[in-house]
Amino acid sequence: MCSASTAPSDTEARSGTRRLDASDGLTGQLLIATPALGDAPPFARSVIFLCAHSTEDGAMGLIVNQGLSEPGFDDLMSQLEIAPSPPRRRITLCSGGPVEGSRGFVLHSDDWTSDGSLAVQDGIALTASLDVLRVIADGSGPKDAFLALGHASWAPGQLEDEIRRNAWLPAPSSEAILFGNNHGAKWHRALASLGIDPSRLVGSQGHA
């Protein structure tokens, strides 16, 4: 059973919406797992959206193709005492990664933001406060959104090294891959965006 800690915290620091620039490297891109990572969860055949990346601070991202059936959105809102019950609107829950699995992050379109939202790229924002869940449960909020529990992170230089070792293929992001409900197809679709046939992808294949 999840607790209130599985969702964003109201105590999250609010310094206003911040925008990341080109110096942040792969911010706003997808990372597509290759067979070089092996078959072990949670990263096998994963697609990760990079919310932040820089050579100085490392990287942070959310897995976007591992949907969760438990906890249910209604149950989570009830545990957090977010009204109404049942909620007027529901969004998908995903396993965002192995780090801080009890913490929630809402990735969403930027037609709705709060003071604590991080503008990742044009059209996409990240919010880690309960505000976004309240407006969604009330039937409004951003047009597109999903709630990720946990995240993936890399120390400075670690992600670059993994890319050199053929573990990940960077690719442009798209709304269909980020917010689509067919999680099983996202890995194939992300590879197809690079013109790669998954059946021809082998562990030794690199990325320039």
Image: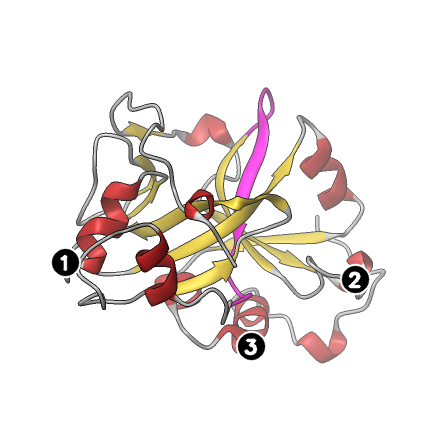
Residue 21 part of the magenta-drawn span? no
Q: Amino acid at mark 1?
A: Ser
The residue under the point 58% across, 23% down is 57
List x then y, in percent, for residue 109: 27, 52
Residue 50 drawn above or below residue 33: above
Q: Which residues are magenta?
A: 54-67
The numbered disc on residue 184 is: 3
Residue 96 appears anywhere in the view: yes
The numbered disc on residue 40 is: 2
- Left or right: 199, with 119 as reference point: right
Pointer 2: residues within 10 angstroms few (<14), some, or many (20+)?
A: few
What sort of colour scheme is used for the picture?
Answer: secondary structure
Residue 156 drawn above or below residue 93: above
| Nearest the eye: 75 or 194 | 75
List x then y, in percent, for residue 139: 15, 62
List x then y, in percent, for residue 5: 46, 43
Residue 66 part of the magenta-drawn span? yes
Distance between the Cα atoms at labels 2 and 3? 17 Å
| Nearest the eye: 181 or 169 | 181
Q: Amino acid at mark 2?
A: Ala
Q: Amino acid at mark 3?
A: Gly
Disc nearest the viewer among 1 and 3: 1
The numbered disc on residue 140 is: 1
